[in-house]
Amino acid sequence: MTLKDETKAVTRTQGPKCVISRVLPELSEEDRSDLLEMLDPLSGYQHVAIAEALKGRDFHIPDGAVQRHRRKKCSCYARPVSAPIRKEPA
């Protein structure tokens, strides 16, 4: 098996969407646009403030979920499965 084949074998595909991605289609076009803009880590909006604003729209989302999505550490983004750096001697 080639290195590329092995890499493909241990790479997860995208998992189920996180809570942020599930909320986006339920927002109005204006709110969706605003949220996408605010999710940019350089937007100046704090993840706690974003979560609170969403609660005002009846979406009870933990601020940690906002933070994970902003950092691309949520299930929306495929991540490789950890593997040892070197093989164990046979």
Image (cartoon, rainbow, N blue to C red):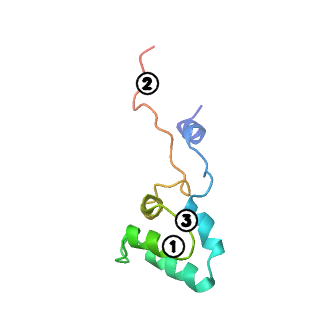
Which labelled disc corresponds to residue 54? 1
Residue 10 location in percent, x, y?
56, 38
Give the residue type that dot 3 points to.
Ile
The residue that mark 3 highlights is: 20
> Badge 2: how crowded within 10 Å, few (<14), some, or many (20+)?
few
Task: Say which residue appears at 50% left-offset and 55% top-offset.
Answer: 74
Q: Indicate the secondary structure of the residue bearing disc 3.
A: helix
> Disc 1 or disc 3, which is closer to the eye?
1
Q: In the figure, is residue 19 to the left or right of 41? A: right
Residue 75 location in percent, x, y?
55, 53
- Mark 1 to mark 3 CA distance (whole Å): 10 Å
Residue 29 location in percent, x, y?
62, 83
The residue that mark 2 highlights is: 87
Q: Indicate the secondary structure of the residue bearing disc 1.
A: helix
Give the residue type that dot 2 points to.
Lys
* Viewport quadrant of the N terminus: top right
Q: Indicate the secondary structure of the residue bearing disc 2.
A: loop
> Badge 1: how crowded within 10 Å, few (<14), some, or many (20+)?
many
Tell me the quarter of the picture where residue 5 sits: top right
Give the residue type that dot 1 points to.
Leu
Which labelled disc corresponds to residue 17? none
- The correct choice, above or below, for 2 with respect to 34 in the image is above
Q: In the figure, is residue 81 to the left or right of 13? A: left
